[in-house]
Image: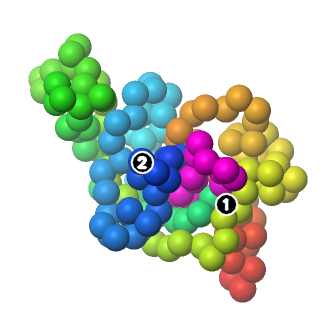
Amino acid sequence: MAYWLMKSEPDVYGISHLEREGNTLWDGIRNYQARNFMRSMAIGDQAFFYHSNTKPPGIIGLMEVIETGLIDPSQFDPASKYFDAASTPEAPRWDCVRLAYRRTYPQLLSLEELRSSFDEQELPVVRRGNRLSILPVPEATALRLLKLLDPSR
C-alpha cells in the first residue's frame, strides 16, 4: 500500500462532497507529473484529502483508491474547462482514479502545523511554491501524519 496527498479546493470539491457521494472520479488533472502519479496508484492505496486555496489550507480527511487506470472523461467534453482538443478516444492523454471516502478528521491539520512537523523531503507539500495537486507520501511520513490526525490511533 502506498500513500498520497491529493489537493482540492473545498468550495469546488471538498471532503463534505466526497462524504455525501461516497466515491468520486478524481478527474480534471492537467499536469503530466500528477497524472503519472495517478498512473502508479494501486487499489487500496490511501490518500490524504488536502483542502487547498483556503484559509488555512491543510489535511482534512482520508480517501482510498478503489479503481485505477480510468480514462478521464472530461478531456473529451467541449463544455468542460478540462477539455483537451488534442486528446482523442483512440489516444487519450489524461487518466484518473476512483476514490472512496474513508473519514473526515475532527480538526484540519494546517499547512503551518505540517511545516513545523515535517521537512520538504518528508512531505513535499510543505515546500514553498509547491503547486502540484498530487504528491506521494513516504510510508513513515504517512504513519506520523495518521498519528497527528488521530492521536488515539
Check the image and report above or below for 47 versus 94: below
Judged by depth in the image, the label closer to the viewer, 2 or 1, is: 2
In this rendering, does residue 27 appear at all?
yes
Image coordinates for residue 129, horizontal then vertical, percent = 71, 29
Are the two marked residues, 2 and 1, in contact with CB atoms closer than 8 angstroms? Answer: no
**Residue 35, picture quadrant:** top left
- 139 vs 49, left or right, is right
Q: How crowded is mark 1: few (under 14 residues within 10 Å), some or many (20 or more)?
A: many
Q: Nearer the viewer, residue 89 or 76?
A: 76
Q: Would you place residue 126 above or below residue 139 in this image?
A: above
Percent position of residue 12, x then y: 42, 48
Residue on which disc 1 sits = 142
Magenta stretch holds residue 145: no
In the rendered image, the residue lying farthest to the right is 116
Q: Which residue is depicted at the point 49% across and 47% down? A: 8
Residue at disc 2, secondary structure: helix
The residue at 23%/13% (across/down) is: 86
What residue is drawn where x is 34% and y is 70%? 20
The reply to whether residue 3 is in sight is: no
Residue 12: image tag = 2
Q: Element at badge 1?
A: helix
Q: In which quarter of the image is the C terminus?
A: bottom right
- The image quadrant that residue 24 belongs to is bottom left
Q: How many labels does the image show?
A: 2
Highlighted magenta segment, given as a residue range = 47-58
Residue type for callout 1: Ala
Residue 56 covered by magenta stretch: yes
Residue 94, placed above or below residue 13: above
Provide residue 112's location: percent of width, then percent of height.
80, 51
Q: Work out whether 61 lies above or below 52.
A: below
Amino acid type of the residue tagged 2 in the rendering: Val
